Amino acid sequence: MKKVCIIGSNGYVGKSMVELVKDQVNLSTKEIDNPYSIVDGVDVAIICVPTLMLEDGSCDTSIVEEVLKETNAKYYLIKSTIPPGTTRKLLHRYNKEIVFSPEYIG
């Protein structure tokens, strides 16, 4: 069974992801304010953290980047809202296996 960690499991998107996968994988969850060490060694880290708007109207991806910098998973799935081109930038910056799948929970 695959090991999956959902980072940001206390938010709207994170809670939805927990419900979606909880019966299918070996699941651990992390609030965004907890240490990230539990993420090390998991197959997939699902990133569901806030990306707030900055004063200039741009998207603050600092929490997403902190997760990528501080953790070691085999693959990363970003569900947080990020601007076009961010995944490519993060792939090069962190040299990790990263994909983005926009969240449309309605």
Image (cartoon, grey):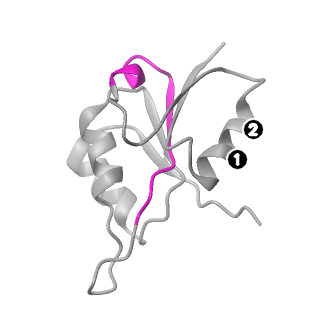
What residue would you read off at disc 1? 16
Circle 2 SS class: helix
In the image: residue 48, left or right of residue 67: right
What is the C-alpha distance between the residues marked 1 and 2?
A: 5 Å
Q: Which residues are magenta?
A: 37-51
**Residue 76 at x, y = what percent?**
45, 39
Residue 26, located in which quarter of the rendered image? top right
Taking 92 as reference, is 24 above or below it? above
**Is disc 2 surrounded by few (<14), some (14 to 19) or many (20+) residues within 10 Å?**
few
Q: Quadrant of the C terminus?
A: bottom right
- Residue at mark 2: 19
Residue 11 in the image, given as x and y percentages of width and height: 57, 51
Could you tell me residue 70's position as x and y percent? 25, 34
Please, what is the three-letter code of the amino acid marked with disc 1? Ser
User: Circles 1 and 2: CB distance less than 8 Å?
Assistant: yes
Residue drawn 49% across the image and 44% down it? 8
Classify mark 1: residues with Cα within 10 Å, few (<14), some (14-19) or many (20+): some
Taking 54 as reference, is 20 above or below it? above
User: What residue appears at the point 63 percent right and 60 percent down from the top-left corner?
Assistant: 103
Which residue occupies the foreground of this view, 46 or 90? 46
- Amino acid at circle 2: Glu
Residue at left offset 69%, top offset 64%: 104
Count of numbered circles on the image:
2
Can residue 102 be found in the magenta stretch? no
Can you name the residue that lies furthest to the top here?
1
80 over 95 or under it: above or below: below
Q: Quadrant of residue 2?
A: top right
Q: Secondary structure at mark 1?
A: helix
Residue 48 in magenta?
Answer: yes
Q: Position of residue 63 (x, y in %)?
A: 32, 52
